[in-house]
Image: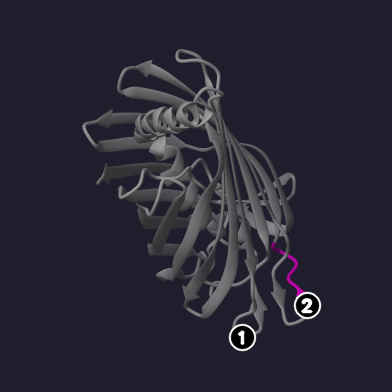
Amino acid sequence: MNSILAALEKKYFLIKMYQRKNILLFIAVFVVFLYYESHSQCNCLGSGLGGGLNQPAGTTSRGILPQSNFRLQALYKHRSGDEFFSKDINQGKGFINNFQSDYLGILLGYGFSHKLTVEAEFAFFPNHKVDYYYKSVNEFGSPSFYLSGKYNVYSSYFKKFEFTAGAGLKTAFQPFNYGLLLHSFLHKGFGENALDFYMISRAELNAKNHNDFQQGHNLSNSFFLTKNVFEDLLAIAELRADFAVKDYQGKRSLDSTGFFVLTIAPQIVYSFSDFYVSALFDLPVYRYFNGSQIATRNPFAISLGWQFD
């Protein structure tokens, strides 16, 4: 009898989580892509750009996919900025007049089993423009590729609880670099018509490249509260904390690198059939930068997704 009840619980849980994740998958696409976009770095424009061109804007991880299901997601994000921060003090204009950055990301996930999901992420900057007053530099940001797996450690439909953890590798191409990725996803529900709570974490441990440069290790944590406004419209409130240690060139740490940023990010998700569209707007509430770094001014993002079997 216990085994039958356990099997029924697993079946009902998977069905329910599939329906819920269909609606909530854009929590995933934003945090996964925005995290990459936040911490990516081409290392070609000089110091002092880390706070803006590489400023945090999200964490990442998702729960697992149903077995034999695919998830395809794409995201566009625009950022700009023209003010420098030193520690938590706004210094106004600096040696850069302003910057403009456009980002594109694509993610493909596949459910190998009801416990295991694998994901591949590809991301790049088609526009990466910095105005130095006397000249403008426009470059493509370094494309990066991530490959990771995640395993459902524990889940219960009746307790409305799920915990998933995973790991993977990342590769940057210009210059070539690699690193280790760790992430986790925790969900707790509070009734059919109440709020749902999510905690999503991601850490990247970066190796040195052939130029003896090492991007700082970084950690992001996001806390989400979600609520259905209408049947197909979901409102999301996110509180996000991003931390990065300093970059290194050889054995020397670079002064204007490393930061802590606390952000509130309101989001909306609209679903129709197996497709989804979402929008996000970042509102930084506290920023602390080592040295002097240019900061992002209220970035926004739009995402599209499709989940199918």
Q: Gap in Å between the C-alphas at discs 2 and 1?
A: 13 Å
What colouring method underlies this structural image?
A: one colour
Q: Residue 252 carries which label?
A: 2
Q: Give the range drawn in magenta.
A: 253-257
Q: Which residue lies furthest to the front in this view?
A: 1
Image location (x, y in percent) of residue 249: 70, 79
- 99 or 206: nearer the viewer: 206
Q: Which residue lies furthest to the top in this view?
A: 193
Q: Report whether 279 appears left or right of 163.
A: left
Q: Which residue lies furthest to the bottom in this view?
A: 210
Res 138 seen here: no
Q: Residue at x 55, y 48 (%)?
A: 296
Judging by the rendered image, the residue that carries numbered circle 1 is 211
Query: Picture quarter containing residue 277?
Result: top left
- Assess disc 1: are there few (<14), some (14-19) or many (≥20) residues with their C-alpha within 10 Å of its C-alpha: few
Q: What secondary structure is the stretch in magenta mostly built from? A: loop
Q: Residue 28 carries which label?
A: none
Q: Residue at x 37, y 34 (%)?
A: 18
Image location (x, y in percent) of residue 137: 45, 70
Image location (x, y in percent) of residue 55: 58, 53
- Assess disc 2: are there few (<14), some (14-19) or many (≥20) residues with their C-alpha within 10 Å of its C-alpha: few
